[in-house]
Image (cartoon, helix red, strand yellow):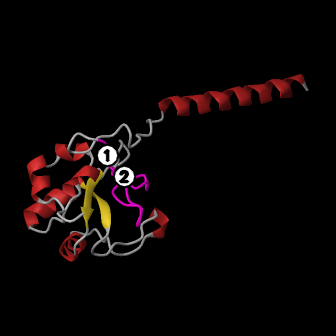
Amino acid sequence: MELKTIGIAFLITISIGLFAFQINHMEPQITAVETKNVLGTKLQSCCLDPVTGFFRDGFCQTNAQDYGTHVVCARMTREFLDYTLAQGNDLCTARPEYRFPGLKPGDKWCLCAVRWKEAIQAGVAPPVILESTHEKALEYVTLEQLKAHEEINK
């Protein structure tokens, strides 16, 4: 009986240790309050209908798990949606398993910075909302490029 008690205590200790390790090694969740946009001011929400963002919180936030770097808040156009489909990225078809509703022209969405940059070169970059575009976008494109594609009537 005593051996069983020691075994249970050991398992509980290991479980608590593993939990503490996971908590201590998790990447902190970035909040919009701490995050800046490309203008150097507080990052604004991109869209809540449909809910966008890597974290599906409405913000174009990112972290190390966001391999696509979804930081450019853009309003979808038919030309861009057709272009990205031709590149193998179907943004029109709903994928509920990823909480992805499928997009249509007029929807706002947090795009991958690299794909938006490619769309500039192809002449089909959708308009961006600067206040909702994460400052990390500036690692891929210039502020001048973003401003040249700024949405006029927000």
Q: Nearer the viewer, mark 2 or mark 1?
A: 1
Closest to the observer, 130 or 101: 130
Up the image or down, 100 lies above or below 140; here it is below
Up the image or down, 130 lies above or below 17; here it is below
Which residues, given as a range, are shown in magenta? 42-60
Q: Image check: 142 left or right of 101?
A: left
Q: Quadrant of the N terminus?
A: top right
Q: Which residue is mark 2?
A: 59
- Name the residue at 28% across, 72% down: 106
- Name the residue at 28% across, 52% down: 132
Q: Is residue 52 magenta?
A: yes
Q: Image check: 13 left or right of 72?
A: right
The kind of residue on which mark 2 rests is Phe
- Name the residue at 21% across, 45% down: 38
Q: Image check: 12 left or right of 32?
A: right
Closest to the observer, 145 or 88: 145
Q: Which residue is mark 1?
A: 43
Label 1 residue SS: loop
The image shows residue 92 at horizontal and vertical percentages of 33, 75
